[in-house]
Image (cartoon, grey):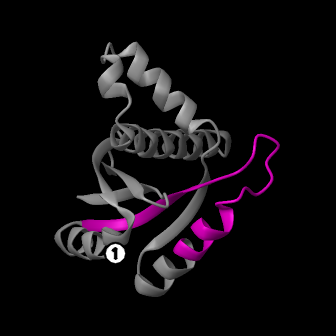
C-alpha cells in the first residue's frame, strides 16, 4: 500500500506519523533524534512505498515565519534533493503542539508521562498529517 509520511521536524527530536492510502487515518510511528533522522528515513522509505512526505511548517499565529522556519525549510530542501521521486510538501503546523497537549490531557495520561516531549512530538506529527488529509479531502469535495 502507498504511504504518506509526516514529519514534525525539531532541533533535537522529530516526530513521525504515516497513513496508508486509501484509508487515510494518521498513525504515529516514533520519535527520532533529529541527527539520526536521515538514516531512519532511508530505511523506512526502502521498506515502505512512501509516495509523499508532509513536513510541518512552523508559522507564528499571524502566519509569519518563526525562528525555526528557516531550519525546517533547509530540511525540506535536503529531502527534495535526497528523495527526488517522492512528492514533498510543507503544511502549516500552527496550534499542533497545543492540540497535542490537549490530546494528552484528555486521554487521561498521568502528568509525569505528559512531560515526555517524545510523546508530544509523535502526537504532533499525527495531528499534522490528519489535518493535511482533512484539508485535501475538503479540497476534493469543493472541486466536485
Across the whole image, how many numbered discs are drawn on residues?
1
| Disc 1: CA contacts within 10 A as few (<14), some (14-19) or many (>=20) | some
Q: Is residue 42 left or right of residue 24?
A: left
Q: What residue appears at the point 60 percent right and 39 percent down from the top-left corner?
A: 138
User: Is residue 67 or residue 53 the one in the foreground?
Assistant: 67
Q: Is residue 35 above or below residue 25?
A: below
Left or right, 5 with reference to 43: right
Q: Quadrant of the N terminus?
A: bottom left
Quadrant in which the C terminus appears: top right
Image location (x, y in percent) of residue 55: 51, 59
Residue matched to label 1: 38
Which of the pair 143/35 is nearer the observer? 35
Horizontal relation, residue 35 to residue 136: left or right: left
Verify whether residue 59 appears in magenta. yes
| Residue at horizontal 67 percent and vertical 40 percent from the top | 142
Residue 126, quarter of picture: top left
Describe residue 91's horizontal placement relative to residue 30 as left or right.
right
Asked which quadrant contains residue 48, the reply is bottom left
The residue located at (64%, 53%) in the rendering is: 58
- Residue 42 drawn in magenta: no
Seen from the viewer's position, the closer of residues 142 and 130 is 130
Q: Which residues are magenta?
A: 49-75
Q: Position of residue 25 (x, y in %)?
A: 35, 39
Residue at x-position 53% and y-position 29%: 99
Q: Secondary structure at mark 1?
A: helix
Q: Point out residue 132 in the picture as x, y percentages from the top left corner.
A: 53, 46
Residue 125 appears at what percent x and percent y? 43, 46
77 in relation to 70, above or below: below
Amino acid at each position: 500500500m502507498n504511504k504518506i509520511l509526516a514529519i514534525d521536524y525539531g532541533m533535537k527530536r522529530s516526530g513521525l506519523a504515516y497513513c496508508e492510502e486509501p484509508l487515510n487515518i494518521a498513525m504515529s510511528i516514533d520519535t527520532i533524534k533529529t541527527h539520526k533522522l536521515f538514516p531512519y528515513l532511508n530505511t523506512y522509505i526502502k521498506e515502505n512505498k512512501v509516495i509523499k512526505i508532509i513536513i510541518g511548517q512552523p508559522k507564528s499565529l499571524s502566519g509569519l515565519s518563526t525562528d525555526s522556519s528557516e531550519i525546517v525549510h533547509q530540511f525540506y530542501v535536503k529531502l527534495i534533493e535526497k528523495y527526488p521521486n517522492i512528492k514533498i510538501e510543507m503544511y502549516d503546523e500552527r496550534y499542533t503542539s497545543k492540540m497535542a497537549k490537549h490530546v494528552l490531557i484528555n486521554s487521561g495520561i498521568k502528568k509525569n508521562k505528559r512531560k515526555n516531549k517524545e510523546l508530544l512530538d509523535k502526537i504532533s506529527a499525527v495531528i499534522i498529517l490528519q489535518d493535511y488529509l482533512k484539508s485535501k479531502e475538503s479540497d476534493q469535495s469543493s472541486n466536485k
